[in-house]
Image: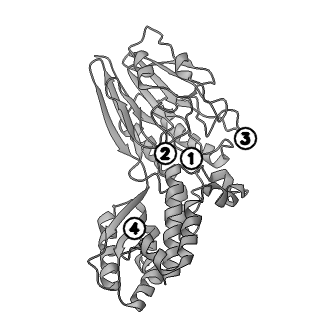
Amino acid sequence: MKQISFIHAADLHLDSPMVGLKQLPANILLRVRESTFTALRKLTAAAIDHNVDFVILAGDLFDGEDRSLRAQSRFRNEMQKLSQKDIPVYVIHGNHDHISGSWVNLDMPSNVHVFGSEVEMKVFHSKRGDTVHLYGFSYLQRHIFDKRIDDYQKQDPADFHIGILHGNEGGGTEHDNYAPFSIKDLLEKEFDYWALGHIHKQTILSETPPIIYPGNLQGRNKKEIGVKGCYLITLDEFKTNKEFIETSDVLWEEVTVDVSSAQSFQEIFQICQLTIERLRKAGTGILLTLNLKRVHLDDIQEKKILDTELLELLVDYENDEESFVWIVDLNLEDNQQFDRNNLLNEADFYAELFAAIDNFDNPEEAIAPLYQHQLGRKYLTSITESEEKELLQRAEKLLIGLLYQ
């Protein structure tokens, strides 16, 4: 029976700077910044442990077009481990690590096969005598909006045909629409598997044939929550077996907890501690956004302590934990609700405030200094319409809360 096995991964983003985390303790920050390399080592170990025929890396291996020497060196070291086990690696480069970038190059071992800027086919022969044709291309520059799927042409004879594509499925709006395609486009090619990259969320677009985004190997910010990893795939003439392999060393999580039943600081503190212990995962670090909903304390002193000392107490012992749960963002939602109509009756000023908020139609102008900053503009992405609305709502709530006090 014809059969092959391989690991499909994408969006490694090696040496990602993990911006905005300088407030972390030095040892946790180091672990977070090392996490993309830790994830790569887990991928390599899995490939060797499962004795796969080959590995597919579907774009954005490196976080930037400059490809730091450190990232290249770490990557080469892992590829050498695979080379020693006679495991080939098939690589395409994506929008982040396109092949027109400027970098000092480190040569990779001979088992690493990189696709060029035009769609091409590479042949793999397994030790059992099976033949696989792999098709793909690397980004020549960062922005490719052309529909490159039309250039994928099936070439027989082969036992299996695998397409590798770093691009955006036409129905998705959360990511840049690079090398767009539709599921129908891929199905028409009659390949046995589509190894996709670019979308950082694990997504299966089709079961037969498998069309899969494995997501990134390691979450890099609070939008990339949950377990990250790659897929171990086994293809034969009749079916596909897929197994998700976790590679993330640090998880981003967000939890909302209703604390309306708590009548004191101590009770809120205990609820938070129980939440942290429930989330703790052996051998894995967690960066947590904790939202406390319907907070209400009558005691003014306790409320002041809640605002100023709760976070410090919750992370006090996490610095020394291998399986840490570190709160990167603590949000307190006061149980007190402000009604606009009631506030308008209290003071004329609120009418002016609400009018200014309702007529504020350019949030991007308010945050422009961030995007104009020399370092900020390198790492910030444009905010969505829903994020703009959320910023305005939070700003309104903050202003009213401060004024009402």
In front: 14, or 266?
266
Measure the C-alpha gap from mark 2 to mark 4. Answer: 32 Å
The answer to the question of whether label 1 and label 3 lie on touching residues, with beta carbons closer than 8 A, is: no
Residue 103, placed above or below residue 321:
above
User: Is 112 on the left-hand or right-hand side of 133?
Assistant: right
Name the secondary structure under disc 2: helix
How busy is the neighbourhood of tag 2: few (under 14 within 10 Å), some, or many (20 plus)?
many
Q: Do the residues labelled 1 and 4 touch (CB within 8 Å)?
A: no
Residue type marked 4: Asn
Q: Nearer the viewer, mark 2 or mark 4?
A: 4
Which badge, 3 or 2, comes first in the chain's sequence?
2
Residue type, numbered disc 1: Leu
Q: Give coordinates of residue 252: x percent, y percent.
A: 43, 57
- Going from N to C along the chain, the mark reached first, 1 or 3, is 1
Residue 117 figure quarter: top right
Which numbered disc, 1 or 3, marks the residue closer to the eye?
A: 1
Say whether disc 2 or disc 1 marks the residue closer to the N-terminus. Answer: 1
Residue type pointed to by label 3: Val
User: What SS does tag 3 mark?
Assistant: loop
- Identified at 41% across, 21% down, the residue is 184
Give the amino acid type for the residue marked by disc 2 in the picture. Leu
Is residue 178 positioned above or below 371 on the image?
above
Disc 2 from disc 1: Cα separation = 8 Å
Residue with the mark numbered 1: 14
